[in-house]
Amino acid sequence: MKILLANPRGFCAGVNMAIECLEQAIRYFGTPIYVYHEIVHNRHVVERFRGQGVTFVNDIDEVPEGSILLYSAHGVSPEVRAKARRRNLKTIDATCPLVTKVHLEAVRFAREGYHILLIGHEGHDEVIGTMGEVPDRITLVESAEDVDRLPFDRDDRLAYLTQTTLSVQEAEQIIRRLRERFPQIVGPPKEDICYATTNRQEAVSQLAPQADAVIVLGSQNSSNSRRLMEIARSMGKPAYLVDSVEELRDPQTGAFPFRPDDTILVTAGASAPEDVVQDCVRTLLDCYGGEKEEVTVRDEQVHFQLPYELRVIASAQ
């Protein structure tokens, strides 16, 4: 067997920052510590922090008054922040700066009199937070077909934004249809889809043609991980999204769905830990023998600072 190990893969700068935030908070304050929604969309990461005494909540009312609360990497709405203040919670904002950028763009466009068309997936934490910034001035668009149903015309003042973890190709199709129907529409000065999402999708697009099958390490609720699987499948490749390679074993025989001489592309979503990737590679090579080749499609050198409140504490240590 030949394993093609895609690079870049796994943790992005926003995920690294969010996880470091929670680790530092545990170190400084101890537990219990609460996080609004999952810190990142990955089962391994969430379970590890649960084991350290972290509680993940879906409602601010679940957090005892005066407690420490982290906002996840996906961001929250002003309503959630206001509710946390009313409960006198000590908050640490681990929102990815690229998500914060989209929030600020939504506020700016609304202030300038635009109605915003947000390209994204209904129910995703990031979309909920962004729409919460200007709920009366924003409409969700999930597909090119949705564009045709929008109740606006060419005289309306419109702007578009996108969820940061979308399929680049899918977003481009929707934006193209928006521009066809509404030539006056404006967009952000810089693309909203984050560099890490774009780079991981580019790596799969370039490397999947060399593979017989594709394994994406990531959780089912990870939007960017699902996009990687979908890209591989759109290229006619069997593609699997799993938290662990062990999920691919046949429950009766314990066998994997691969042939001994297959070439397998292994990658990971932006919230999947590297140890899960390495475990996958070791397991397949132990089973089939063969070799591993790491292929770098694009270099990443991005780092985000910890939030101000944690930097202040760290400087006082």
Image: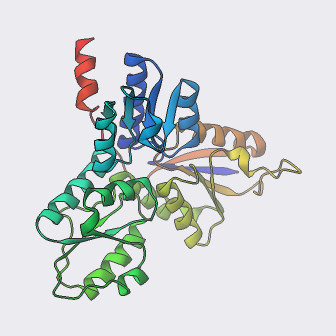
Looking at the picture, tell me which residue is in the foreground, 52 or 287: 52
Query: Residue 63: horizontal and vertical position, in percent?
Result: 44, 33
Seen in the picture, residue 38 relative to 264 is either above or below; the reply is above
Relative side of 243 to 317, left or right: right
Say which quadrant the C terminus sits in. top left
Q: Is residue 141 visible?
A: yes
Query: Residue 90: horizontal and vertical position, in percent?
Result: 32, 28
Looking at the picture, tell me which residue is in the foreground, 7 or 294: 7
* Residue found at x 23% / y 85%: 182
* Residue found at x 38% / y 29%: 65
Q: Is residue 207 visible?
A: no
Residue furthest out toward the left: 112
Quarter of the figure with residue 59: top left
Relative side of 299 to 152, left or right: right
Quarter of the figure with residue 209: bottom right
Seen in the picture, residue 118 relative to 287 is either above or below; the reply is below
Residue furthest out toward the top: 317
* Residue found at x 28% / y 36%: 85
How is the structure coloured here? rainbow
Residue furthest out toward the right: 252
Query: Residue 32: horizontal and vertical position, in percent?
Result: 48, 23
Query: Residue 155: horizontal and vertical position, in percent?
Result: 15, 87
Quarter of the figure with residue 276: top right
Q: How many marks?
A: 0
Looking at the picture, tell me which residue is in the foreground, 237 or 112: 112
Seen in the picture, residue 289 relative to 126 is either above or below; the reply is above
Seen in the picture, residue 186 relative to 74 is either above or below; the reply is below
Relative side of 242 to 228, left or right: right
